[in-house]
Image (spheres, coloured by chain):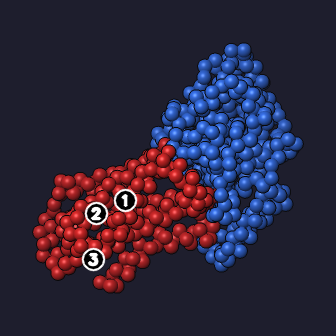
Amino acid sequence: MLIKKYQSLREADVTDYPLYKRRREFIQAGLALTGAALLPGIANAAASSLTARLPGVSQSDKYQLDDPNSWEDITTYNNFYEFGTGKRDPSKNAHTLRPKPWSVTVEGEVNKPGVYQMEDIMKWNSLEERIYRFRCVEAWSMVVPWVGFSLADMLKRFEPRSNAKYVEFYTLVDKKQMPGQRRSVLDWPYVEGLRIDEAIHPLSMMVVGLYGRELPNQNGAPLRLIVPWKYGFKNIKSIVKIRFTDKKPHNTWAVLAPREYGFYANVNPQVDHPRWSQARERLIGQSTLFSSKQRTLMYNGYGDEVAHLYAGMNLRKNF
Amino acid sequence: MHFTKVTVFSICLLPFTWMVWQAMNQLLGSNPVEELLYQSGGWALRFVLIVLAVSPLRKLTGWTTLLRFRRMLGLFAFFYASSHFLVYFLLDLGMDFSFVIEDIIKRPYITIGFTALVLLIPLALTSTKGMMRRMGRNWKKLHKLVYLIGILGVVHYLWLVKADLLEPLIYAAILLTLFAIRWFDIKIPLVTFKKKSCTGQPGVSVVSDETA
């Protein structure tokens, strides 16, 4: 186990310092605890190989956080039901997804609808790394160094019309590439949506990478949404269609369980999920079993930037 | 007999040993507390179902030796349910009493799971031969609670799942099958041997015959 880890560490350590650091800590903790180096036959979590480096990624000045989660955590603990409902399923099953070639269909209330190739989309904007908090509706969280660009910069290219009040996103449907879709656990395709002012907020991001590398399939390759003040399920993955509309979109989880998941899904420690508390969260990747949960922050800590979007709204009703 | 009991005991302890091993070697994945909750809860439910399966299996196969392990299997159900609760209380909630009370009151699936654990306590306490003799008929009545515990366990699991009900529904199906075997008293020819082989174990036969 550790021999394997050490090899992947060497591959990465020159270029990805945070990754290197986390792996060092992980290995040291493992050694200190048990001397597990003597037991090479036992594999750790599902294997998570590194993807290719993305050229020309700059660091965001504004969005930096200490101690991002390890590559291992971010790529082996995923909710991506298109590849199975277990947390480790996506990392095991997502190899069937073919993120290249890829295209995105744009339709609805825009002046420039059409089918856009992913390789062209990649040329529109320079890539930036932003480290955001990520809070799942299941009350766990991570800190993730995403690579991508502002959603607003992408959307304005399509020239939305004035009656484009919402924007809707669709995930790929393909039972061959996404074996989890053979069972109708959710109503495929996965659909998510944002109000247009949320979508063009500078925090909203189109993500194409992770840790300076191409986005792994299990994290939503090649193109996914990240809206860091909302619960994880808003951050739709492997997007194939963007639609501008004047009607509020029906997002997948809200359709499945309207009492439990809303359209807004803003992180809010005061409004509990009907079945569990949202007041605290388990930060993934802590070194001991005895680490306690941490308090969940209003709007996941981005309240200064986004609270005005919801001024005067009843957040209990619009959960 | 002694050797067989030690063997069965060791097998029943394997899941626990495996959990401790995984925890010590950081093999529980990115969310170890969630993984331990899942594994311990799964084994608690499986042992409740195994206990409920003993009597139907005896009826179907006529293999009465099975009954001798029922007490041990039941105590293992209690053991795994307690481990499940302890992981939740010590590791997930960080021993915070206010959180556990809030959860038990406000979250129905936790209320139900906790009820199942509480109901297991009197069954564990009265599992000795002495208690069986002293309680007589009441012992049987009390121990019928295990049916209810099985239902509560399955509902607890069904209620906490987000969208994929497959696994809890499999447990529900097993539970319903076991109930059906009891209620409709499904018999196969082998059963004719049962009276013969049930003699000579007074302590156990009190429980064994028609209790369940």
Q: Amino acid at mark 1?
A: Leu
- Along the polypeptide, which appears first: circle 1 or circle 2? 1
Residue A17 figure quarter: bottom right
Q: Which chain is blue?
A: A
- Name the element at disc 2: helix
The reply to whether residue B69 is in sight is: no
Residue under mark 3: which chain is it in?
B
Give coordinates of residue B145: x percent, y percent.
Answer: 30, 58
| Chain represented in red | B
Q: Are marks 1 and 2 on the same chain?
A: yes
Q: Quadrant of the N terminus of chain A?
A: bottom right
What amino acid does circle 3 point to? Gly
Please state which of the two labelled residues, at mark 3 or mark 2, is closer to the viewer. Answer: 3
- Residue at image coords 37%, 62%: B120
Q: Quadrant of the C terminus of chain A?
A: top right
User: Residue A62, position in %: x, y?
Assistant: 85, 41
| Left or right placement of residue B187 versus residue A211 in this view | left
Q: Is residue A126 above or below residue B189?
A: above
Element under label 1?
helix
Number of the label disc, if any, that sits on residue B119: 1
Give the mark, 3 or 2, whose residue is nearer the N terminus. 3
- How far apart marks 3 and 1 lie (CA) works out to 20 Å
Q: Which residue is mark 3?
A: B130
Disc 3 and disc 2 on one polypeptide chain: yes
Identify the residue at image location x=66%, y=75%: A34
The residue pinned by badge 2 equals B143
Residue A229 seen by the camera: yes
| Residue A242 falls left or right of residue B2 | right
Q: Residue A158 at what x, y percent from top left?
A: 74, 22
